[in-house]
């Protein structure tokens, strides 16, 4: 009976040690996952910022084009108006 108890204790100690190692490995893996997810967030943020900048540039170009278009229409009205009078 004493040998069985000793064997169970040794087995219990080995299991505890393996569990501790597994928990440490798991923590290391979770840390890597956290690093990867923060890197992914950084990439997504960078991409979103880039898309935002592109949208702002596009809006600026469209606005400038519209201003030029409005001036051209205004000049056409002016020429048409002065031609009639």
Image (spheres, helix red, strand yellow):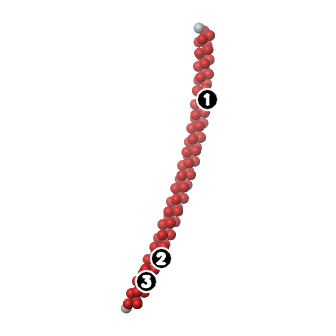
Q: Which residue is most to the left?
A: 85
Q: CA distance from mark 2 to mark 1?
A: 70 Å
Q: Residues within 10 Å of mark 3 (few under 14, many from 20)?
A: few
Apparent side of residue 66 relative to residue 13 in the rendered image (left or right): left
Apparent side of residue 53 relative to residue 75 in the rendered image (left or right): right
Quadrant of the snapshot with the C terminus: bottom left
Residue identified by numbered label 1? 21
Q: Residues within 10 Å of mark 2 (few under 14, many from 20)?
A: few
Numbered disc 1: secondary structure: helix
Q: CA distance from mark 1 to mark 3?
A: 81 Å
Q: Residue at x 62, y 17 (%)?
A: 10
Q: Earlier in the sequence, mark 1 or mark 3?
A: 1
Eye-nearest disc, 3 or 2: 3
In the rendering, at what x and y percent does residue 46 appear?
Answer: 55, 55
Q: Earlier in the sequence, mark 2 or mark 1?
A: 1
Q: Which residue is most to the top?
A: 1
In the rendering, at what x and y percent does residue 12 appear?
Answer: 59, 19
Q: Residue at x 62, y 10 (%)?
A: 3
Q: Residues within 10 Å of mark 1 (few under 14, many from 20)?
A: few
Eye-nearest disc, 1 or 3: 3
In the rendering, at what x and y percent does residue 51 appear?
Answer: 52, 59
Q: Nearer the viewer, residue 84 or 20?
A: 84
Apparent side of residue 15 relative to residue 72 in the rendered image (left or right): right
Residue 76: which disc? 3
Mark 1 touching mark 3, by CB under 8 A? no
Residue 68: which disc? 2
Q: CA distance from mark 3 to mark 2?
A: 12 Å
């Amino acid at each position: 009976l004493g040998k069985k108890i000793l064997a169970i204790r040794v087995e219990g100690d080995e299991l505890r040690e393996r569990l501790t190692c597994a928990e440490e490995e798991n923590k290391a893996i979770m840390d890597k996952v956290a690093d990867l997810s923060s890197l992914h967030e950084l990439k997504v943020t960078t991409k979103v910022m880039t898309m935002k900048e592109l949208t702002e540039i596009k809006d600026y170009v469209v606005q400038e084009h519209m201003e030029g278009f409005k001036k051209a229409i205004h000049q056409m009205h002016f020429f048409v108006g002065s031609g009639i009078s």
